[in-house]
Amino acid sequence: MDTTPSPDLVRAALAEQTLALAAEAATLTAADLAAPSALPGWSRGHVLAHVRLNAEAFVGVLGAAARGEVVSMYPGRAERDAAIEAAATDAPDRQTAALLDSAERFTRAWAALPRQRHDVEFTSPAGWFQPAGVIAFFRWREVVLHQADLHPADAGRRSPADVLAAAEPALVARLLTETCATFAGRADVPPLAVTATDLGATWEIGAPQDAAAVSGTAAALATWLTGRGDGSGVTSSGSLPALPPFA
């Protein structure tokens, strides 16, 4: 199936999810921000700092792409991690204000990127290259997944599956496509045949003859594959395979 959502859909969904994340952030106290997130070793403050700095990095990439320049999102992994550590302890009002400010600058930078520059590549310290045209989707993915990371066990908060179930189906399908493509290039991921029952689509990872058949709704599969859930709502032809961390 074609899992390329329209630019208008990505733009609208990103704006909606960014506001939802900012609304979540605005409810957090300093103690809340210091509490653990769903990501090992990261507090909620780390998660919000990362999302903000991700937008700022993309602003730089978009400006370079508009000039036809290929650049890296970050100078290096150590520099990226140090910036997150420095921003993780910002006061709650600073976290929310900075999140919204970086999102606004991202929106302007994306709107200013000429269509003929969407093929200009950018890279990361991990070594991959991608065309600038994927940046809006990548940004949506960051906002949605990390929104799901904020409240790993709080009663009354939306679970990661809830966050993804409320997202646009075309974007969740694209998330599955991107995640399965990433896993297909890794030796530490077992062979899988992943079927989204609500989309009628299957993605294959590894050798088909050795693959475990895994199925569920697109939201349930995306939650499990990206490490945001334990596999609730996902069924398998055998024992549900163990997966390495996605990101």
Image (cartoon, rainbow, N blue to C red):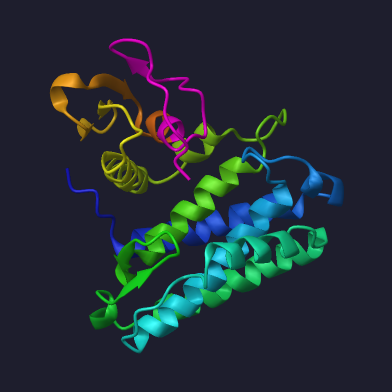
Q: Pick out the residue farthest to the top.
A: 238
Q: Which residues lie in the magenta part?
A: 223-247
Question: Residue 236's x, y, as percent?
Answer: 32, 15
Q: Pick out the residue farthest to the bottom.
A: 67
Which of these two is toward me, 45 or 241? 241
Q: Which residue is drawn at 36% across and 46% down?
A: 175
Q: Quadrant of residue 86?
A: bottom right
Q: In this view, does 32 lie above or below 48?
A: above
Q: Which residue is drawn at 64% across and 52% down?
A: 47
Q: Quadrant of residue 116?
A: bottom left
Q: Is residue 237 above or below residue 109?
A: above
Q: In which quarter of the image is residue 204?
A: top left
Q: Is residue 198 above or below residue 181?
A: above
Question: Residue 127's x, y, as percent?
Answer: 37, 62
Position of the N terminus by quadrant: top left
Which of these two is toward me, 121 or 163? 121
Question: Residue 2's x, y, as percent?
Answer: 18, 48
Q: Residue at x 35, y 89 (%)?
A: 67
Instruction: Considering the whole magenta stretch, tell me its main secondary structure.
Output: loop
Q: Is residue 57 left or right of residue 132?
A: right
Q: Residue at x 49, y 76 (%)?
A: 59
Which of these two is toward me, 217 or 215? 215
Q: Is residue 186 left or right of residue 43?
A: left
Q: In this view, does 210 lie to the left or right of 171?
A: left
Assess whether residue 87 is covered by the magenta stretch: no
How many numbered marks are there? 0
Question: Residue 84's x, y, as percent?
Answer: 66, 61
